[in-house]
Amino acid sequence: MAHYKCGKCGKEFTDEDIKLLPGIRCPYCGYRVIYKIRPSSIRRVKAI
Amino acid sequence: MEITVLESTPTRVRLLVKDAPLALVNAVRRLILSEVPVMAVDEVIFLENNTAMYDEIIAHRLGLVPLTSERALEKYRSPEECAECTDCEDCFVSLYLDIAAEDQPVIVYSGDLKSTDPDVQPVYDNMPLIYLAPGQRVSLEARARLGRGKEHAKWSAATVAAHKYLPVIKFDFTKASRETVEECIECIEGASREIAKKLREMKKGEYQVLEDVNTSLYHYCSRTACKDVLEIEYRDDSFILTIESTGALPPKRILTEALRILEEKSRSLLEALGASTGGGESS
């Protein structure tokens, strides 16, 4: 489940919350610029 | 075969090898670059990274940090045993990094890596790795293992492993006019003032160029200012071998390891040949 953060009000929400309103908008303030938050799981990367 | 040490520092060694076949010197050079094992970071586990650099870029930079490997050659398992497993015992060393920039930007250096094994540490503390802007944080665990240069250049034991034929300058200043000799020496000085001074003192004879200089200019001098007075030739039975270490292993250890690997490979080839010919003689 990807997490997003609004560029204006700073509130965090998930995929489900985005689907509440048409288009890509913050479900709280309606701002159209949102950022994807890095998942909290650990990531293994080869050092190549 | 005769070997003379021309220069020996903690990171560099230059040897004069006489009466050795070219194939042997070249084999040692190739083994130094591709087969002598050293420690380097192979896998990075990211817990947090909100810096401007991608995980892969940071991991790549960590992989290129030289790590002290002299004791590790005995303590850890060989690259062949460790290459395919992720959790084998005695394969990996963990180095941790957890740095956050508060109000000021922070540059993360190789000295900030904390190793679980004091024998495996970054060789240089002042290699910049990541630049953190205020509010950014990086938290990771880097796992290092032994590897060989042929798998990835980060595991190459040496930055420079080069051999060249021994240059010899043959000259006779006694047969030329003073003006010609001065012009010739002025040309030689363009490459090395010390060598020019020695030639002036010797006046005549053969001079083996053991100094670390590029002798290409002497060809030009022998065709122009030093025509009929000086010529340069290269002895094809003597070599100057230069080994410059990354710091992971001392240069002499690199050389002994390369020779040990050469001996091992030669022995296994002889055994395979002996087996294929039905147990023929092997020396």
Image: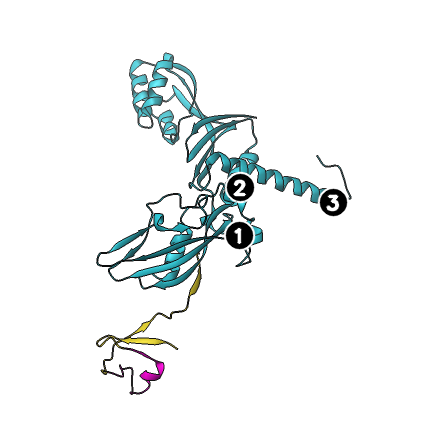
Chain colours: A yellow, B cyan
Which is nearer the N-term, disc 1 or disc 2? Answer: 2
Kind of residue at disc 3: Ala
Secondary structure type for disc 3: helix
Residues at marks 3 and 1, CA–CA distance in whole angstroms: 33 Å
Over which residues does the magenta segment extend? A12-28
Q: In the picture shown, does residue B192 fall above or below B278?
A: above
Residue in front for this viewpoint, B185 or B29: B29
In-front residue for pair B20/B143: B143
* Host chain of mark 2: B
Secondary element at image label 2: helix
Q: Which x, y percent locates residue B43?
A: 46, 57
- Pinpoint residue B127: horizontal percent, then vertical percent: 34, 47
Q: Dot 1, how many residues are within 10 Å of its Cα: few (below 14), some (14-19), or many (20+)?
A: many
Q: Which residue is mark 2?
A: B31
Q: Can you identify the residue that label 1 sits on?
A: B91
Side of B28 where B275 appears, left or right? right
